[in-house]
Amino acid sequence: MKLVIQRVSQAKVTVDARTIGEIGRGFLILLGIKTNDTLQQADALVEKVIRLRVMSDKAGKMNLALKDVKGEVLVVSQFTLYSDTRSGNRPSFLAAAKPESAKFLYEYFVQKLRTLGVTVKTGEFGAAMKIEAALDGPVTIIIET
């Protein structure tokens, strides 16, 4: 699994000009799932996300976690995170998980965050989406299992 975490002051995702997920201060997470990813990897990433200290404190230092600032999360499935461009100019996506298993792990990841008290909004799995985000910092963290 691969996460691209962007600290945002706000973010939203739309499908067919209809807003389906919108947050204020928190994280926009692009979630890539590859073949053979596991529930245990998802659990570990959820724990990392909720403990990641990249939110600014009163002194402007990255010292606080998401829960410390009552931050929200917008999670968007992003199979293209597992593109392979080593051969030619057209990316291969063979490493990305098949839609059925990817959707299961995506929904598991989202639900696990929610069970830990995080407000989570989502994109629409498999849909063509538009994302608008006001990056804060900017701070971008990439984590891969």
Image (tube, helix red, strand yellow):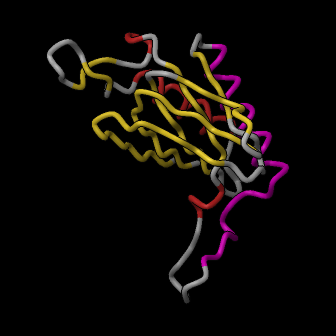
Near-viewer residue (110 or 70): 70
Q: Position of residue 128 (x, y in %)?
A: 73, 53
Residue 104 painted magenta: yes
The single residue placed furthest to the front in the displayed view is 17
Near-viewer residue (5 or 136): 136
When asked about the image quadrant of residue 9, the answer is top left
Query: Magenta segment range?
Result: 91-115
Q: Position of residue 116 (x, y in %)?
A: 59, 13
Near-viewer residue (90 or 135): 135
Residue 22 painted magenta: no
Q: Is residue 59 toward the left or the right of residue 64 in the image?
A: left
The single residue placed furthest to the left in the displayed view is 59
Q: Is residue 76 toward the left or the right of residue 141 in the image?
A: right
Secondary structure mostly taken by the magenta-highlighted segment of the chain: helix
| Number of on-image labels | 0
Q: Position of residue 72 (x, y in %)?
A: 52, 20
Decide: is 35 above or below 11.
below
Q: Is residue 143 toward the left or the right of residue 105 in the image?
A: left
Residue depicted at 49% across the width and 21% down the height: 24
Decide: is 120 above or below 102.
above
Q: Position of residue 110 (x, y in %)?
A: 67, 28
The single residue placed furthest to the right in the displayed view is 100
Residue depicted at 66% across the width and 30% down the height: 21
Residue depicted at 74% across the width and 37% down the height: 18
